[in-house]
Image: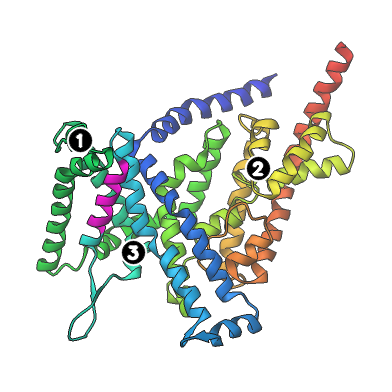
Amino acid sequence: MANNKKDGGFAAAVEKHLMPIAIKMGQMKPLIAIRDGIAIAMPLIIIGSIFMIANSFPLPMWTNWLATTAINKVTISAIFTKIVNGSFGLIGLVAAFGIASSYAEQYKTDGKSAGIIAVSAFFVVTPSIMSGDKVPLEGMPYGFLGSQGLFVAILLGLLTGYIFQWFINRDIQIKMPETVPPAVAKSFSALIPGAVIITIFGAIYAIMTWSGLGNIHELLLHILSKPLGLLGDTLGGTLVAILLNSLFWFVGIHGGNVINPIISPIWLMNTDANRVLFQAGHLDLAHGGHIIAQPFVDNFVYMGGGGATIGLVFSIGILIMMKRASEQAKVLGPLTIIPGIFNINEPTMFGLPVVLNVTLVFPFIVAPMINAITTYIAMKIGFVPLCNGAVVPWTIPPIISGFLATNSWTGSLIQLINVVLDVLIYLPFMMTLNRKQKEEEAGKIKEA
């Protein structure tokens, strides 16, 4: 009885202290805007990743054919690279639109207009590239349109969305007669806030240029990269993020929805930086490559879902094969193992359940941490290549995703090692839970 009270007290304490924090963070408009804004870019990121994987698949016959087959002197490999740059390489620009749009919509104003204004402001503050022709041609660097522009995209998107809704909700706008089509009316409503926003960012660009400070992208990278890097680009910071993710999940709150808006931009920036190095043939730590990136977390840490529950569902499977599983485990096994292989763990989280189940809280926290540590060490010593920049969809099963994320069989091997470790971590605790379930089932049979 004492143990049950102790367990209940721990669960109650975690719920008491974490639940209010999670609720407040989950309701914060800026975090919601960042989460939703970056999510808008995910289809482009995945599409770009597919073409990047296709362009660099480790099969010499294939890559040589791509590099030598040309139409009008343009190789298929160059076309694939262009597609990658035109999709994955635009995450900063797209995020600026999405963040401003989401922020404005949360205040019941026109998100599309706010997003378009944010895109314009993003171009205004981004330095141009001029050709050396007699009639110079102006272009934009993919670096700032992509991952290097994420910091600016976040701040610019939030500021644009806030200013836009401030004007509209205070009725500082140009109103058109009711007979005017809604699309036209909205465009005129956006004139005043749009002019103010673009003027502000035009002034910022002018100040940065005239003062010789460079541009706002490089300034923010210089100011924010080190402190935020401690959170998102180090093993220690990643372990803290994993701990918080698991604790939020433990009380029934989607940990990713709370943690990712804060740290995911850093992981995505590192991912895109690795992509650029990989395409240039210089992806290693010596050239500035990053171990911690979005695929590192999605494909090597959270195998099976939050808490690395692939080890848990395989433990259930082992008990079933040994014919030692409780009736509850026998029912849950088929419902959890298949989704777990594809990193979907809601049936496990709420069916077993894992949520508020003190018996499983230790492995639920420790397993993903162990995955992070082993993968980090393997990449640090060069046994496993760094993630190549491809964002492999999180639903791709382990072994396959490890190969795609690193372009190496050792990526699959470290996943296999991690899965074995996860099973070893979860199995003793699952056996304890299984024994409790069988005792409860035996008691019910006697009562009947």
Q: Residue drawn 66% across and 44% down? A: 309
Asked if the residue at tag 1 contacts the one at tag 3, i.e. Cβ–Cβ closer than 8 Å, the answer is: no
Q: Tell me where the magenta segment starts and ends, as one range.
A: 111-122
Give the residue number, with chain letter if any, for mark 2.
Answer: 363
User: Which mark, by number, is residue 168?
Assistant: 1
Colour setup of the view: rainbow
Snapshot quadrant of residue 418: bottom right
Give the residue number, with chain letter if any, for mark 3.
Answer: 145
Q: Earlier in the sequence, mark 2 or mark 3?
A: 3
Secondary structure, magenta segment, majority class: helix
**In the image, what residue type sits under mark 3?**
Leu
| Any part of residue 409 in sight | yes
Q: Is residue 434 magenta?
A: no
The residue carrying pointer 3 sits among few (fewer than 14), some (14 to 19) or many (20 or more) residues within 10 Å by Cα, namely many
Q: Mark 1: which secondary structure? A: helix
Q: Mark 3: which secondary structure? A: helix
Q: Mark 2: which secondary structure? A: helix
Q: Is residue 190 above or below residue 253?
A: below
The residue carrying pointer 2 sits among few (fewer than 14), some (14 to 19) or many (20 or more) residues within 10 Å by Cα, namely many
Q: Position of residue 393 (x, y in %)?
A: 57, 55
